[in-house]
Amino acid sequence: AQAPSTHPALRHCVALLRLHLTSPSVAAAKQIHARALRVAGVPLSHPLLAKHILFQLASLRAGAPPLLYAVTVLSRLLPDPDPFSLNTVLRIAASSARPRLALALHRRRLAPPDTHTYPPLLQACTRLLALREGESLHAEAAKNGLVALVFVKNSLVHHYGACGLFESAHRVFDEIPVLERNLVSWNSVMNGFAANGRPNEVLTIFRETLEVDLMPDGFTMVSVLNACAEIGALALGRRVHVFASKVGLVGNRHVGNALIDLYAKCGGVEDARKVFEEMGVGRTVVSWTSLIVGLAGNGFGKDALELFGLMEGMKLIPTDITMVGVLYACSHCGWVDDGFRYFNEMKDKYGIAPKIEHLGCMVDLLGRAGRVEEAHDYINTMPLEPNAVVWRTLLGACAMHKKLELGEAAWARLVELDPGHSGDYVLLSNLYAAVGRWADVQILRKTMVTHGVRKNPGHSLVEIRNSVFEFVMGDRSHPESDQIYLMLAEIAERLRRQGYVPRTSNVLADIEEEEKEAALNYHSERLAIAFALLKCLPGTPIRIVKNLRVCGDCHLVIKLISKVYDREIIVRDRSRFHHFKGGECSCKDYW
């Protein structure tokens, strides 16, 4: 009789497995496996058959490979599985719902590690955000002389970036010789910066990729476009869009979705719509969701809900993020009844269990509408434990509508859940100031100093001719400060002739009226707008990004500036966009 390893039936089964690699399936693998065992009499522990079965499973494109089947095949090779089979099972486990199994298998030291052992193990650590295990594997790979391999380095860059250690990720990236860096290396380091809120570093790395003449892919462009969106750099984003067109990536649906997000986050709603329309049949639920959320955030709540209606008409199933956008649109337009109707449909029609984000939207919906007591009752009866964001939303509503007792109750919960958050101190301070309790304002500020709580200073960014300029309140650091302040004086005079009277109630400080007027005039967004009026061509839209909420007086002033100077001004503040044009705002003065 022929040995099993040379049996024609075994060779035939291996050939069949190789043939099925073009369209692998679990059913085919199991059928061929059974044929080898029954017809060829191949033992369960035969390494050649196991190797090809496992490789077939790892090659599955649709759905997760059957982990139990893979581990069973591997178990027949014990106690001495070959490294290839073990590494293949590590790959399957790392990408499965049980990535920790990959680490458990490695701890058993079933076979000596080789060049393909560490990437799947680091992938498992990344999915688990298991930083310590990842660091241990890093040390082990160095000890085994395998850490210098570019695909091990790439896995380490991705792991450290995902775990929040973007500096460590960049340090590992720097250790890769320039000529050995591949697209995965560059994408991993960019993604690490992007995931940790470092957009400027993403753009710096992208410029470096262009210097080494590297052809980007969809993942590259998504990281870069997201970075542009985060800092509100529309002009730069447009150039990246042109670049993506030149390299043939605009047809990539992920790039298309990122472009919708970019334009929406930079206030370019029409551009976002255009990208959406050009995607055609390539549109996914993510595409619809991106535009719905973008329209809602830009104050076009009616358009957002109309688009959601079209999405429903196409029988597309919304995601939980889609519904956040829909509820956000209702909240920022004051449509309380519609908001509750959509909330109920989300549960009853689409079977989406409410998450804390949806419940938070409902609290915001009631709070903005002035129904603060109802918002408080809603929190007390919601099915999930309210987190700090929910209570902060209520505190913000209390500050807006001067509800002192409920505001103090919300503050008490915030002290328990998230002590030391500077924004909470600011909201309570504003509430005290709004009701004239200046002594409490002073006590609160002293408490901040005692506890080392520092308030984030307000700043505004404006992009002019491919450069981004930053201003803070009363800023005189700019080399053209004299001209900027002369322009502010001109603006103030022209607005007074239009009947503008400063709303000094928006200055929540116990100072004289004249000082309040001066303080309002030097808010960071006004400095940015004055500079833009000096530098931009007539008729050019002015785009401002502010890290705090625009105050009521600045909102009124910007409306008047848009009318007097015939400029479209788009302001993105902490929570939404305001599109000012002809003396009106897209928010309809409801924000």
Image (spheres, rainbow, N blue to C red):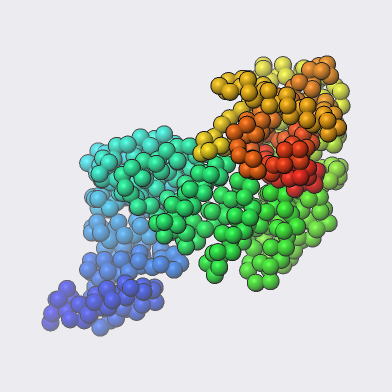
Q: Tell me where residue 307 appears, x and y as whole percent.
A: 69, 63
- The answer to whether residue 293 is seen in the rendering is no
Is 266 left or right of 436, judged from the image as shown? left
- Quarter residue 589 falls in: top right
- Quarter residue 23 falls in: bottom left
Query: Going by the picture, which residue comes out furthest to the front?
Result: 538
| Closer to the camera in the image, 338 or 117 | 338
Image quadrant where one finds the N terminus: bottom left
456 to 84, vertically: above or below: above
User: What number of labels is visible?
Assistant: 0
- Residue under the image location 33 percent in, 49 percent down: 214
450 to 139, vertically: above or below: above
Is 323 left or right of 178, judged from the image as shown? right
Q: Tell me where residue 336 appears, x and y as whole percent.
A: 82, 53
Query: Going by the picture, which residue comes out furthest to the left?
Result: 1
- Residue under the image location 76 percent in, 20 percent down: 518
- Residue under the image location 83 percent in, 30 percent down: 497
Q: Tell me where residue 281 appears, x and y as whole percent.
A: 54, 70
